[in-house]
Amino acid sequence: MTRLRPFAPEDLPSLYDVCVRTADAGGDARHLYPDQDLMPTIFLAPYVALDPSLAFVVDDGSRAVGYVIGTADTAEFVRRYRREWLPTVADRYPAPDSLTTPSEEMLALMHNPERMIVPELAAYPAHLHIDLLPEYQRKGLGRELMTAFLGALFERGVPAVHLGMVTVNVSARAFYDRLGFHVIDVPDAGVLTYLGRSTSPGC
Ligand SMILES: CC(C)(COP(=O)(O)OP(=O)(O)OC[C@H]1O[C@@H](n2cnc3c(N)ncnc32)[C@H](O)[C@@H]1OP(=O)(O)O)[C@@H](O)C(=O)NCCC(=O)NCCS
């Protein structure tokens, strides 16, 4: 039996595991990054550190097997990421000197949170990440997580949310399309596609 519940600090090791197993365009990224904590340190931990009340997990009775995390205000998140989060990890993860390995590319992202401020996304102030372990996908749990996250944003009066997804992740794109997300045109988005939607339950 699975159940959806708010994030608790004890979930963190399980969520690191979910993150790294889904960090290569939705698939397992453990072969790409020798340091298994690298991807969660960029794409998971700052969210639960800076806004834990927007984090929800799916629990299988023994551990968290999926999550949705995010921020209500991307611009404020970026400011706090640089001021509060980056100093806590910069010793372990210094800025890279070159961009020759996948890890160095990710370290460059870690040290450039301002990349998240994109003018075309200004009307969608919130953003999110959502991931489930493979054996828990396609069972309606992603929809449940998203409903909880959108509901929490709506209650806070946040009108709209965006996300940036790796364009080759066509499975995730089918999920977002089904949940009412639309493409937001962002020039020079590189490998990413940006999607957005209102937080209103009727949409
Ligand atoms: C993407 C992800 C969060 C979706 O969650 P999920 O639990 O698998 O999706 P759900 O079962 O809740 O599906 C919700 C709806 O989307 C549809 N859907 C989901 N994945 C789909 C796919 N690959 N193809 C077609 N439709 C899909 C479902 O049919 C369902 O439609 P319905 O509710 O109208 O019947 C999950 O599959 C996942 O974690 N994938 C790996 C990590 C990842 O890619 N994360 C996103 C990175 S941007």
Image: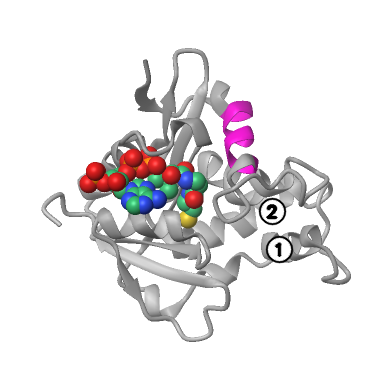
Q: Residue at x 59, y 48 (%)?
A: 27
Crowdedness of circle 1 by 10 Å Cα count: few (<14), some, many (20+)?
some
Q: Quadrant of the C terminus?
A: bottom left
Tell me the element at label 2.
Answer: helix
Q: Position of residue 97 (x, y in %)?
A: 88, 69
Numbered badge on residue 183? none
User: Residue 86 got which mark?
Assistant: 2
| Extent of the magenta region | 12-20
Mark 1 vs 2: CB contact within 8 A: yes
Indicate which disc, 1 or 2, sits on the residue closer to the N terminus. Answer: 2
Q: Residue at x 47, y 34 (%)?
A: 66
Judging depth in this view, the residue of 44 and 103 nearest the camera is 103
Q: Is mark 2 within 8 Å of ligand 1?
A: no
Separation (CA) of disc 1 from disc 2? 7 Å
Residue visible at 52% across and 78% down? 189
Image quadrant of residue 112? bottom right
Residue matched to label 1: 111
Q: Is residue 161 above or below residue 28?
A: below
Q: Is mark 1 within 8 Å of ligand 1?
A: no
Q: Is residue 83 left or right of residue 130?
A: right
Colouring convention used in this rendered image of the protein: one colour
Q: Give the tally of numbered discs.
A: 2
Q: Is residue 149 visible?
A: no
